[in-house]
Amino acid sequence: MCYEQNLTQSQIAQKVGYSRSMISRMISEARENNIVKIRIHYPLQRIRELESYLQDVLGLKDARVLQRGALNHSEMLRRLGALAASLLEEHLHDHLIIGTSWGTAVYETINTVCGQILE
């Protein structure tokens, strides 16, 4: 309710008939017990012009290019994995055959996909 409906703890307390401190304790307990998780989804910065160019020149159905900017190497790989995972999820369907290679980028992609499945 706090984040989805943009309500304060006091507003939630009024709505459900508990004290604000009780709501605060309930939220803290829910976090500690992994009942709720707060995640901030930020858009991955992409270079859409280069994506279109690669699709045209190479005849690709789809492409993603990550804007690296000032990211360090490990953060860039983590975000690259997240970008690849989102592309994979868009095209995933039953009986699909997927070929992969190995390396850190594939590792980060699998970590992102598996993390989303577990949630």
Image: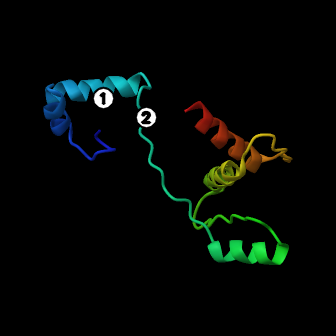
Seen at 59% across and 38% down, the residue is: 116
Q: Would you identify the image quadrant in which residue 64 lies? A: bottom right
- Secondary structure under tag 2 reads loop
**Residue 61 position (above or below residue 14):** below
Assess disc 2: are there few (<14), some (14-19) or many (≥20) residues with their C-alpha within 10 Å of its C-alpha: few
Assess disc 1: are there few (<14), some (14-19) or many (≥20) residues with their C-alpha within 10 Å of its C-alpha: some
Task: Where is residue 12? Give x, y as percent.
Answer: 20, 35
Q: Which mark is residue 27?
A: 1
**Residue 105 position (above or below residue 114):** below
Foreground residue among 103 and 24 = 24
Left-right relation of 8 to 105: left
Foreground residue among 68 and 35 = 35
Q: Amino acid at mark 1?
A: Ile
Marks 2/1: CA–CA distance:
10 Å
Q: Would you identify the image quadrant in which residue 117 lies? A: top right
Q: Would you identify the image quadrant in which residue 48 lies? A: bottom right
Outermost residue toward the front? 94
Left-right relation of 50 to 96: left
Q: Amino acid at mark 2?
A: Lys
Task: Where is residue 51? Give x, y as percent.
Answer: 70, 71
- Report the coloring of the rendering: rainbow
Seen at 80% across and 47% down, the residue is: 103
Q: Which mark is residue 37?
A: 2
Seen at 62% across and 54% down, the residue is: 79
Task: Where is residue 62? Give x, y as percent.
Answer: 73, 64
Left-right relation of 18 to 3: left
| Comes first in the chain, label 2 or label 1 | 1
Task: Where is residue 77? Give x, y as percent.
Answer: 67, 53
Name the quadrant of the C terminus. Answer: top right
Q: Are marks 2 and 1 in contact (CB under 8 Å)?
A: no
